[in-house]
Image (cartoon, rainbow, N blue to C red):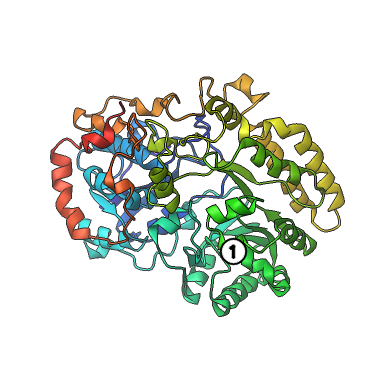
Amino acid sequence: MFISRRSSGKKRILLVNASFDSFRTYEPRQLFLTAATATFYLAGAFNPDLCEVRTHCEVQSGLLKREDDFAWPDMLVLTGTTNALDRMRQLTAYARTKNPGVIVVAGGPAIRALPTLARACFDYACEGDLEEIEDVIADAFGPGYVKPGLVPRFDLYKRIDGVGFVETSRNCNFACSFCSLTGEGGKYQTYSESFIRAQFEALGKCSYISLQDNNFYGNDRASFRERLAIVKEYWQRGYFKGWLALVTADFFAKEENLVMVKEAGCVGLFSGVESLQSDMIERYSKKQNRHVDRFDIARKCIDHGMVFDYGLIFDPAHQTIDSFRADINDILSRDDVTSPGFLSLAIPLPGTPLFREIAAEGGFLPNVRLRDMDGDTLVVWPKDPLDEVAAYVRTMSCMKEHRAQLFRQVFRFAWNRRNDLTWDQLAVCVVKPLFRAFYDTSPFDLLGRRHPNRSGVTTTEPLDSLFTPAFPVDGRHASLFTPTMVTDRKGEVIQDDLLAKPRRAPDVARAAANRNAANATPVDAPLELMASD
């Protein structure tokens, strides 16, 4: 809750990670995901002597919905995942209603995927990387309001159980077909030693840290060792008890890598397994997974005293339910590897190769909404009968039909691996899958945590209550509560932006020119994109 009190002469900046909850409960979910850290890096670009900055994450802290919250800022900065674009538009309508002079800035994968729609909605639609915010601030307020360097404002972050976050690189050197990074085409980049150290110093001491790199290993072995040495130094200095990171499967090809990270304080690694079936690995273009035994790399990781975390992806357009069940059953029959950290549908996000493949096949369902591309809602025609897949999808993420088997597996694993992992690590391996298994099902149903009318299919899925304004909004912005449609009633993709490759080409001058027009006239997106048939 924000208090509407202005510091003398300072610009008021509110940075929001916008989100639609895939469970449709809209309760704070502090234990489900790592923190969305972009807002803290963006916050670091504002001169604290001239700006009062606040952040809000709708995943961890729940919906931003108080009217006073929207009346407070002079500038609203929005980011989020691709499917959160409509939530950004809703927040824009609220802010402009309560403060018509507010400047709205939006960036991230949603903006790069749908630049035409974004430019019609936001004063600054940033198609570049985080650094573009410095140009935006200078253009909107003047160069004096910029603090160069993007050193994150971790003082604005409420840590969960002492966990902190640091990033040493950006993007990924692989090109998985379903990944938004692949669609954007950004090159893998490593950060300078000075910037990495600045992040650690800004973070201070905490229990554990999670390295937020899309691929900590990368394709530059010298850089990997240099960055690892920095992490090791701060671990040895007592800044944290241990750390976790995401690495690709090629990391496990060399035993020395496991030894090095363990000696540097690593307590857990995440790697994208996605599927145990070679044909699906090829379809996902996961070159890094072609010649590895997923169980073998999991065992190696655990043998070296580190938790191995991963997820599985179900692609109902090219895979049967039985084949996906076979993967799960295979995993749950083993006592020496962890159970999956999450289960998700393959998401054909706009701009990705998977999206273009599904579109070329005519594989999208009718009336697909961008909001429903959340990994928990069916948006493609499945190989199996639609009603069977819909029923499976509704309980897939909590592994309902595998629950008894899951129970046995996690406890057998904990017993068998009790000498390889610490009690903290074993607790994570047990609590995480069981918490997920019961999050949106009995006994929590009694508390109304699960949406009672979900179909699990985008065409028939009830529209979230968020698409009805929580309080009256200016009529000029009412269209921002209309869902963005990806396909029409025939299942055909509606707008060219959705098939084009996103661009990373910031144009602050163009954005500034659009600002006055956007505030002076009704902000309507192209009709063909908005009509929900």
Q: Determine whether, in the image, residue 215 is placed left or right of residue 113.
A: right
Query: For this rendering, which residue is in front, 292 or 198?
Result: 292
Which amino acid, mark 1?
A: Gln
Q: Of 214 and 461, which appears nearest the observer?
A: 461
In the shown orientation, is residue 310 left or right of residue 151? right
Which is nearer the eye, 106 or 255? 255
Q: Position of residue 215 (x, y in %)?
A: 55, 63
Residue 462, image x, y percentages: 44, 23
- The image quarter containing residue 483 is top left
Q: Residue 468 occupies which quadrant of the picture?
A: top left
Answer above or below: position of 105 versus 144: above
- Estimate how packed mark 1 is, as few (under 14), some (14 to 19) or many (20 or more) residues with alpha carbons within 10 Å: some
Q: Residue furthest bottom?
A: 222
Helix, strand or loop at mark 1: helix
Q: Image check: 156 left or right of 253? A: left
- In the rendered image, which residue does mark 1 sit on? 288
Determine the residue positioned at 40% across, 62% down.
Answer: 185
**With 459 as the anchor, is 205 left or right in this view?**
right
Q: Is residue 115 above or below residue 485?
A: below
Instruction: Give the quadrant of the N terminus.
Output: top left
Question: Picture coordinates of residue 315 (x, y %)?
Answer: 55, 42
Q: Is residue 68 above or below residue 200?
A: above
- Quick check: can you spot residue 76? no
Residue 324 percent location from the top left of the image? 64, 41
Q: Is residue 330 above or below residue 391?
A: below
Quarter in which the C terminus is drawn:
top left
Count the labels in the image. Answer: 1
Residue 392 visible somewhere in the drawing: yes
